[in-house]
Amino acid sequence: MHPYTFPLHDSLLNYAPLIQIHRWFQFYEHPNTNLSNQLALFSENIHIKSRFDESRGYEAYKERVSKISPQWINAHHIQQVELKQIDYRTIELNLDIIYQNIGYLPNEQLTNTPLHYRTKLAVENMQQLPRFTEIIIEESQLDIPSGYEQFISSYPEHRIRTLIYYFCTLFDSKLPSAEGFKDIFSSEIDISLPTAQCTNFEDFTTWFQERPAQMLQSKHVLDSLNINAIAPNSYQVSFEFSWSGASKIHPETPLAARTLHQWIVIDNPSEAFARIQTMSVQTLPCKIAAIA
C-alpha cells in the first residue's frame, strides 16, 4: 500500500497536515534545525503523549526536547497514512512509521521501532497552515518490512516533501498574491514553465497573478518523487504531478494534465523550508494540457 493518499477535496486540507508532520520529524533528524520553527507547528496548549512521557504547552515541550541526547541519530519512515476531516476546523492525521535510532543502545546499535501516531490539527483559516493540538505516540503492531537492517536517513525526503506540498498549497490557492512563495524561493531563481520564463520573483509574480482570473479550481497530486543529493545541503529533485481543475470560462468541463518537474533545491536546515533555486516544468502527454 502506498502511504500517501489525498482523499480531501482541497489541496490545503490534503497537504497541510502532511507538511506539518514532515516538519515534526525533520526537527529530530538534523543537528541544525530551529526550535522556533518546531514550536510554530503547535497550538499554545499542545498536548503530546509518548510511551515515556506527557507534556502540555510550549514550555513543557522545550523541557522535553532538552533531554534528548545530541548524540542520537534518528530517522522516521512513514509506512501508512490516514487523513480525515473531522469538522470545519479539525483534521485528524494518523500514521504508522518505522523509527530508527542510533545512540539509545550502547556501541551504536541500531534500533527499529514501529510507532503509531494519532494527531489532531486545528484549521484557523484557509490561508494558514493548521497547527497540532494533540500528538499521541504509541507502539504499533506494524511488522517491520525488509530493508531496514541498516540506518537510512529520512531527512531529505521529509525536507523535500515539505517543500513540494507547501508549493501545492500556495499554487492551488485562490489567493492572487504570490508573497507566500518568498518562503520557498531562493534569492536568485530560474523558473522555466510551459507558458513563461521567470528569472526573478517579479516575473513569477506577474505570471502567477494571472491565474485567479482563469482558474476556478486547481488540485495537484504528487505521483512520483526522486531525490538526489548533489552537494552538501543541495538536492536535485524530479517528480510528476497529476493536475485537475476547472476554468472560469467553462466550469462545467473538467480539466486534467500531467507535468514533470525538475528542481534544484538549496537547504538551510535552520529555516522553516528549503528553497527552490531552479525549476523546469514540462507538460507530459495528456488529454488536456495544464497551465503549469
Image (tube, rainbow, N blue to C red):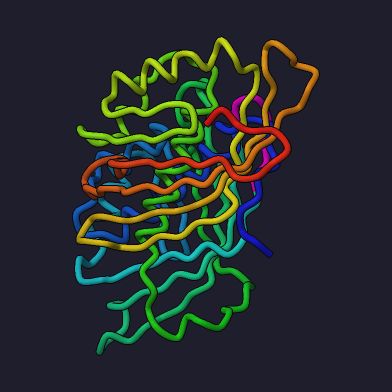
Position above or below: 246 against 138: above
Percent position (x, y) of residue 169? 50, 31
Occupied quadrant, residue 41 = top left
Examine the residues drawn in magenta and state their main secondary structure.
Answer: strand
Is 277 displayed left or right of 163 in the figure?
left
Q: Is residue 160 visible?
A: yes
Residue that appears at 38% across and 15% down: 206
Residue that appears at 36% across and 18% down: 205
Percent position (x, y) of residue 159? 37, 51
Percent position (x, y) of residue 80? 62, 61
Percent position (x, y) of residue 235? 31, 56
Span shown in magenta = 83-90
- Looking at this view, name the residue that lies furthest to the bottom: 107
Q: Is residue 86 visible?
A: no
Depth check, front residue: 18 or 279:
279
Depth check, front residue: 26 or 71:
26
Residue 224 belongs to the span the image colors magenta: no
Position above or below: 272 against 231: above
Residue that appears at 31% across and 53% down: 27
Position above or below: 199 against 132: above
